[in-house]
Amino acid sequence: MDAAHQHLQQHGDILEDFHITHAGDDMHLIMTHRGGQDSEEIHSLAWDAFQAGTSVAQDLKLYGAGQDLLSYSFSGNVRGLGPGAAELEFTERPSDPLVVFGMDKTEPGAFNLPIYRMFGDPFNTAGLVIDPSMNEGFRFEVWDVRKHEKVMLNMPEDQHELLALIGAQSRYVIKRVYPRDGNKNNPDEPVAAISTEKLVDVAGEYVGKDDPVAVVRSQSGLPALGEVLEPFTFPHLVSGWMRGSHQGPVMPVPFHHSQTTRFDGPPRCIAAGFQLNDGELVGPRDLFDDPAFDHAREKANEQADYMRRHGPFEPHRLPMEELEYTTLPEIMDQLEDRWEPVEAEEGEATGTENVETFE
């Protein structure tokens, strides 16, 4: 982290401000700039900062150093190279609070449920009912990460269709959320963005879980800060955890508890709160460093106990079709020559016999 910080300080003239933090073993570069979305300069700067950090990690012989930086040359964008990216381009408001969430040991779809609750669930976000500027709802941009397609769905009228998709969180992922007409915010400027990069799609094999990030703006026509944080009082189950092969609860933790230990987990989430001031990141505040989330952490531990008791059995272990890119196929390959046809046992019907019933 120090090496990445030094690199951004020395070469980050194009930045307005930056902050470096981490969730578990994943480093996050939080940067503000005026270069526009998908800026090659910004992505190149981020890539070089990650490389600088990787070099130090390799010198220290840290396990898995650089495993998320796949061996492809930079081509103008970090997407497809390993790191995840969540970008928002917007006009700064008179007061613009935002939260950067970072998860470890899970996948991008892990944000589906909390983002839906922030912007679509009136039982979580009272403003959808009592705030006139939010009453029209929000637009959700959902990606099919297998087919590389997207669809725009409006809340509340497309609620059932939205839930039909994002409930399958390993395939359909909320990418961005936009205000709708009637909101005091620009409907063309996103108010939430989530990283959707999946390492297995790039590498073709398991090289670590995706460990997504999200950026969420709040207040003044958007969910209040308390409504943004409220979904994390429920430790919902996500895929990931040990070797990316298990289901486990998301535990909201303060920065100093974001290390993943028990069974390489359980999956963790941090929340860094910032106030944006002419591009400057004022903060961060450690928003989960609060006894209000103690009960969620206790529940997450109870759920982790319950899931771990299943050992290698589903539903703790992921279904076979979701283990396709993990290390399990290597085990299956070793058994390939040991399978034998099943012979019909005595008294057992075979495909050549007829079964008839008479009255």
Image (cartoon, helix red, strand yellow):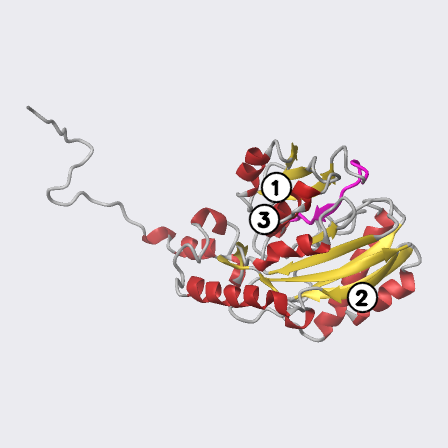
Residue 192, percent from left and from top: 72, 47
Badge nearest the viewer, 3 or 1: 3
What's the amino acid at mark 1? Val
Whole-angstrom CA distance, mark 1 to mark 2, is: 30 Å
What's the amino acid at mark 2? Ala
Whole-angstrom CA distance, mark 2 to mark 3, is: 32 Å
Left or right relative to 345: residue 101: right
Residue 78, percent from left and from top: 75, 50
Dominant SS type (magenta): loop
Residues marked 3 and 1 touching at CB (< 8 Å): no
The stretch in magenta equals 185-197
**Dot 2: what SS?**
helix
Left or right relative to 245: residue 24: right
**Residue nearest the viewer, comparing 198 with 216:** 216
**Residue nearest the viewer, comparing 177 with 341:** 177
Q: Which image quadrant for residue 131?
A: top right
The quarter in which the C terminus is drawn is: top left
**Residue nearest the viewer, comparing 203 with 6:** 6
Mark 2 neighbour density, 10 Å: few (under 14) some (14–19) many (20 or more): many
The quarter in which the N terminus is drawn is: bottom right
Residue extending farthest to the bottom is: 60
Which residue position holds label 2? 4
Residue 281 included in the magenta stretch of the image: no
Residue 315, percent from left and from top: 42, 54
Mark 1 neighbour density, 10 Å: few (under 14) some (14–19) many (20 or more): some
Which residue position holds label 3? 113
What's the amino acid at mark 3? Leu
Which residue position holds label 1? 145
Mark 3 neighbour density, 10 Å: few (under 14) some (14–19) many (20 or more): many
